[in-house]
Image (cartoon, helix red, strand yellow):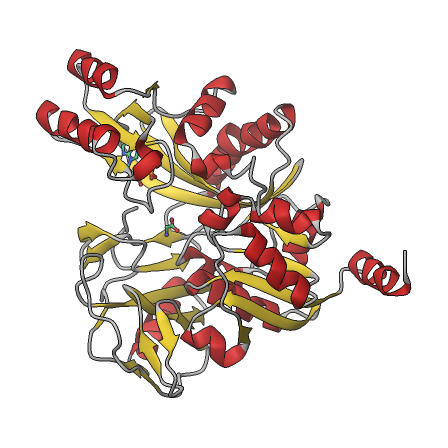
Amino acid sequence: MDVRSEIIYMLKMANIFKKVLIIGSGGREHALVKACLKSPLVETVIAAPGNGGMKKEVECFDAKIEEPQEIVKLAIEQSVDFAIIGPEIPLCEGAVDALEAVGILTYGPNKSAARFEGSKIFTKEFLKKYKIPSAAFEKFSDSTSAIDYLRSLDHPPVIKASGLAAGKGVFIPESIQEAIEVVRSVMDEKIFGDSGSEIVIEEFMDGEETSFHIMVSGEYFAMLPTSRDHKRAGNGDTGLNTGGMGAYSPARDIPKSLFNRIVEEIVRPTIQGFIRDHINYRGTLYIGLMLTTEGPKVVEFNVRFGDPETQVLLPMLAQDPVDLMIKCAKGQKVPEIIPQKSGASAIVVLAASGYPNTYPKGDIISENKTPDGVEIIHAGTLMNKEGQVITNGGRVLGVTAYGENIDQAIKKAYQGVDAVDYASKYYRTDIGQVRGTF
Ligand code: AMP
Ligand code: GLY
């Protein structure tokens, strides 16, 4: 080992990471940037590709983040010590494997573990193998057999493209005709490309949805605080499904007994299954759940932090999230329950009107001073050549706030909404006041 490598090795052993690279461009990644800037373990933060708000705080680099080698190239050029991968596509493409192959410690599951989001069939077979509660299912790789199966059903089906489909690959048809149409468009017309070559048809689960975030460190896991997301575009949990219009943490309606039941019936058996199947999972596991009359059942696994949940979860941690991510990346022991602050945090997402359908881009954003305890997180924003920050996505910004309790956090977040303005500004006015849907 030469002197430089030896120094890097010693710093890594001491958990001091001079330069951290965040991959992604959403609100989740802006929240991760802010967490790294606050961490005593980190000296410099860079991001790729970043967004208009991240650019104001850290150096951002253009890189095709879907291609692992592009990330590796940037990380080597920039002498990065630690990388955090935000979105699912680079994780499923093997960004972690590629970075670790050149000796760069990285937070996020490797390509093999990322199949839990990249392949619904893989997840369903894993759940079945380890008897983890979930909907009964069949898998299909040709439309004729899938349609024959649909005709034989006496219960309503849920149809899912097995591969990644940007959150749009799940269908709950209301008639057999609609179900057949779905199968044809996914499998024959290939509306999701190869992601729809295989499908899952599963039973419909009735109940309330919730989700849990877990930081997995090989054989260890750390439960993050609870949170609740509001996925529908309109007030009163109405309108189209979106990526999330607001969230708060902790959730109002997860009693300790239910939390413990989910840990014992779902989380622990999942981690034990990883160990038995030699899946070296080191990153976030985001479990979508249905609380049915028979108990909690898994709806889906995601291999990344939720957005906007990350923006409310990170401020609730009483332990440095960067320290936890480093420990997970190394497979070191982490506390099963992450120590949590006593108050609550909330986010109100500011979208572009029309989202999640078509919406304008390019509105100039004006940002004024926010009240104390309120932070603006950027998502779909861009800095133009003149240095102005403009809208560039459906979810534009998030106003986050920390308060003594949930109601106070939400009130403060809404007080911060007026600090930013742009022509197409749209937001829900009832975050945290209604139950929330997923
Ligand atoms: P997924 O991408 O698998 O989480 O599915 C997206 C949404 O579809 C979920 O958040 C649920 O609202 C709904 N969903 C998925 N699977 C089922 C199921 N088996 N029963 C009822 N709803 C479901
Ligand atoms: N907010 C839901 C998600 O990140 O998938």
Q: List x then y, in percent, for residue 317.
A: 57, 60
Q: Quadrant of residue 378?
A: bottom left
Q: List x then y, in percent, for residue 118.
A: 44, 37
Q: List x then y, in percent, for residue 303.
A: 49, 43
What residue appears at the point 30 percent right and 46 percent down from the top-left corner? 438
Q: Quadrant of residue 163?
A: top left
Q: Is residue 89 above or below residue 404?
A: above
What residue appears at the point 28 percent right and 28 percent down from the top-left corner? 205
- Identify the image quadrant of the N terminus: bottom right
Q: How many marks?
A: 0
Q: List x then y, in percent, for residue 131.
A: 48, 19
Q: Is residue 170 above or below residue 390?
A: above
Q: Is residue 227 left or right of residue 13?
A: left
Asked whether residue 231 appears in the rendered view, the answer is yes
Q: Is residue 334 above or below residue 6?
A: above
Asked whether residue 342 appears in the rendered view, the answer is no
Q: Is residue 354 left or right of residue 291?
A: left
In the image shown, does 426 or 424 lie closer to the viewer? 424
In the image shown, does 243 or 204 lie closer to the viewer? 243
In the image shown, does 150 or 229 lie closer to the viewer? 150
The quarter of the rendering in which ligand 1 is drawn is top left
What residue appears at the point 58 percent right and 70 percent down from the top-left corner? 46
